[in-house]
Image: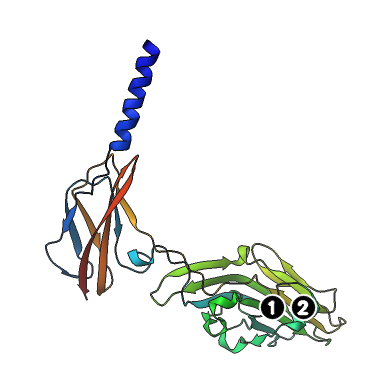
Amino acid sequence: MRKLIYMLAAAAALAACKREKVPMPDFQVHTSSLTYKAGDTVRFVFSGNPDNITFFSGEPGHNYEFRKRTSAANDLQVQFSTWVRYGLVRDNLQLMVSNNFNGKATAEDLAAATWTDISDRAVFSTGVDRTPSGVVSLKEFARPPEDSALVYVAFRYTDYKKPQGQNQWVIRTFEANNVSDDGVVSPLAVMSTGGWLQVDVKNPGFKWTITTAQLLIANAPGTADDNEDWVISKGFNPWQIKPDVGTALKNVSTVLEEHTYVYKEPGTYKVIFDASAVRYTGEKRLLREINLTITP
């Protein structure tokens, strides 16, 4: 009998859960003004108590409409720093780029790809350590997204047999980022995550040394033969972008009456508060939008 009572109680509880309807969140938000100066504190006042509230400020990286975006027309940008020393210092390190390299570290596959010399877009060391290259844009090498073509960056070292010996080059730092039109920066690689491959073309006794801290090709003595060596990054997807995100302000266990925020840059911002009610049987969402103008 007791067992039957337990079973009936469980069945009743289950039926009650199934019958429970998810309520529409009760939520309103307002501000004292729709125009503020950069640096002012904006006070968003709430009424109602939804289970959850997520805040999208409307700034780059925090736009509600881009929360599921994974592809965009970005500007693929690289920057690095270099150091050259020993021997007769000369322009013998080149910055190369390809969008049809197959990623295989052989001289044959290297030669089969189309490489463009863009060395004139960067600054290289003439003896000073950690000489910054400046930001180098590779946007023109992005093929249509349906091609799924990756962009590869390479450093090509060449030197020749001469009494003074050959130069040593060190790539001290490296950074690759996608930057969208709306200013979202999606990090792609740093030195330690560059996926570097070295390819020897001439003089196998001297090659690039790859570590997580730097790329180095040693100086060869004056008796060394002519040399050519490449070090190539992994392929970068120029269309890749990280989805925009909101800030979680509250959950079901908290109560929140207001939220304050400071906009540092002038502009027009579409502010979205995403409120939700969550139950075993599902969830319902409610969006509240405020358009703010931030003046200088």
Measuring from the top left, give residue 124's x and y in whole percent: 61, 82
User: Which one is nearer the viewer's eye here, 6 or 175?
Assistant: 6
Residue visible at 84% across and 86% down in the picture: 161
Quadrant of the image containing the C terminus: bottom left
User: Which one is nearer the viewer's eye here, 291 or 157?
Assistant: 291
Tell me if residue 43 comes above or below residue 185 in the rendering.
above
Q: Which quarter of the figure has residue 152?
A: bottom right
Measuring from the top left, give residue 20's x and y in whole percent: 28, 38
SS state under label 2? helix
Q: Which residue is mark 1?
A: 101
Residue farthest along the top direction in this orientation: 1
Say what amino acid the circle numbered 1 marks. Phe
Is any part of residue 31 visible from this angle?
Answer: yes
Q: Are marks 1 and 2 in contact (CB under 8 Å)?
A: yes
Say what amino acid the circle numbered 2 marks. Asp
Q: CA distance from mark 1 to mark 2?
A: 7 Å
Residue visible at 31% across and 26% down in the picture: 12
The mark found on residue 109 in the picture is 2
Q: Quick one: label 1 or label 2, which is nearer the N terminus?
A: 1
Badge 1 density bin: few <14, some 14–19, many ≥20, Cα 10 Å: many
